[in-house]
Amino acid sequence: MIANKLKVYRDTYDLVKYLIPLVNKMPRIYKFTLGERIITHALDQLNHIQLANMQREKRQIHLENFVVSFEMLKAMIRISFEARAMQGLGQQAEITRRMELIGKQITAWKNTDSKRHRGVNDGSEKA
């Protein structure tokens, strides 16, 4: 399956699209430092999903990399709102909602893949 057909990929893509105009509205002092890092980390999420989808033998590694980068993205977004570089309770709530949805999907994917991988290794998985 092509990664862009996965719901988690589409939801992450939509998050990136949602973040871009918010970063573009950031004050200059934040836009080219924190803002660029937010967009870079958000785009990296798409890469991690693509790699996890393509490289099944390394899927858990790519999903772990996603989680680490995703947590950093959450922290940067939180800092942006606290520093008032990004503003609006509505935007913050929407970003939080989207990120929770993405996080749940990645956790489910990790758990499913982990169970599948354990089943193959112990010979208990049925075809």
Image: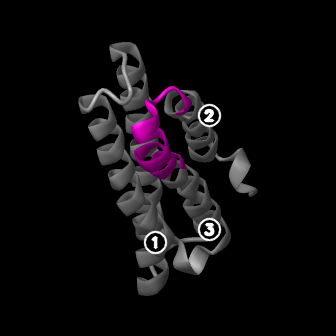
Q: 21 above or below 104?
A: above
Quadrant of the drawing holding the C terminus: bottom right
Q: Amino acid at mark 1?
A: Gln
Q: What's the residue at 46%, 35% (across, down)? A: 28
- In the rendered structure, the answer to whether residue 31 lies left or right of residue 92 reads right
Front tag of 2 and 1: 2
10 Å neighbourhood of mark 1: few (<14), some, or many (≥20)? some
Q: What's the residue at 60%, 54% (across, down)? A: 46
Front tag of 3 and 2: 2
The answer for how far apart the CA atoms under marks 1 and 3 are is 10 Å
Q: Amino acid at mark 2?
A: Lys
What residue is shown with label 2?
17
Q: Amino acid at mark 3?
A: Leu
10 Å neighbourhood of mark 2: few (<14), some, or many (≥20)? some
Q: Secondary structure at mark 2?
A: helix
What residue is shown with label 1?
60
Instruction: Assess whether residue 75 is covered by the magenta stretch.
Output: no
**Dividing the picture into quarters, in which one does residue 29 lie?**
top left
Task: Locate residue 92, reporting x and y percent.
Answer: 36, 24
Disc sitting over residue 51 in the figure:
3
Quadrant of the drawing holding the N terminus: bottom right
**Dividing the picture into quarters, in which one does residue 74 lie?**
top left
The answer for how far apart the CA atoms under marks 2 and 1 are is 26 Å
Task: Locate residue 124, reporting x and y percent.
Answer: 44, 77
